[in-house]
Image (spheres, grey):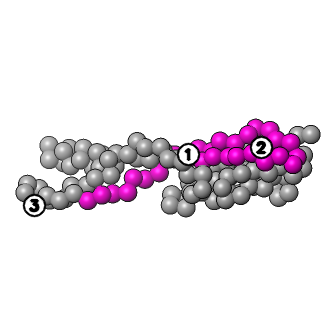
Amino acid sequence: MIRMHALWKDMEEAHKTGVVLSGSGAGAASHFVKPRLVSLHIFLPDKMKPGTRRPCTATGKYSDGTERDLTTKVTWSSSPPGIVTIDANGFATAHKVGGAAISAEHQDSDTVVWETITVVK
């Protein structure tokens, strides 16, 4: 029972640090495990005026405790079409008055988040 508890603690630590030990004693080897995305957040302006262009950003928190800028590593989209467009670098351009949902999808984790931009006169 104690051995299983120690193994579980090692697995928890591996998720945090990205390092997994295999084997025991002198024959033990460590392998790097890619940290997994735990959460994704996007930051964008609440309001814009038609014809303006503003930056949006995406930030990810990982299982090893790090935080990374994912702005150019997510797929951005906007809905409905014609109110706001957003490019691959995270720049939003307002075209006409209305509300638009802006989403960011991270391909490695199938994580999608969205926020709303309102275009006002």
The kind of secondary structure element at disc 3 is helix
Amino acid marked by disc 1: Thr
Q: Give 21 or 121, whichever is nearer the viewer.
A: 121
Which tag, 3 or 1, sits closer to the chain's start? 3
Q: Is residue 96 left or right of residue 74?
A: right
Residue lying at 88% horizontally and 46% vertically, measured from the top left: 50
Spatial CA distance of label 3 from label 1 is 39 Å
Which residue is farthest left? 26
Residue 34's x, y, as percent?
A: 38, 57
Question: Does 35 sit left or right of 104 as displayed?
Answer: left
* Residue at image location 76% in from the left, 38% down from the top: 46
Residue 59's disc is 1
Relative image position of residue 94 (x, y in whole percent): 83, 49
User: Residue 31: x percent and y percent?
Assistant: 26, 59
Alpha-carbon span between mark 1 and mark 2: 18 Å
* Earlier residue among tags 3 and 2: 3
Q: Does the image show residue 27?
A: yes
For label 2, the residue is: 117
The residue carrying mark 3 is 27
Specify whether residue 50 is painted magenta: yes
Mark 2 surroundings: few (<14), some (14-19) or many (≥20) residues within 10 A:
many
Residue at left offset 38%, top offset 45%:
64
Q: Earlier in the sequence, mark 1 or mark 2?
A: 1
Q: Are marks 3 and 1 in contact (CB under 8 Å)?
A: no
Asked which secondary structure carries label 1, the reply is strand
Q: CA distance from mark 3 to mark 2?
A: 56 Å
10 Å neighbourhood of mark 3: few (<14), some, or many (≥20)? few
Amino acid marked by disc 2 = Ile
Q: Secondary structure at mark 2?
A: strand
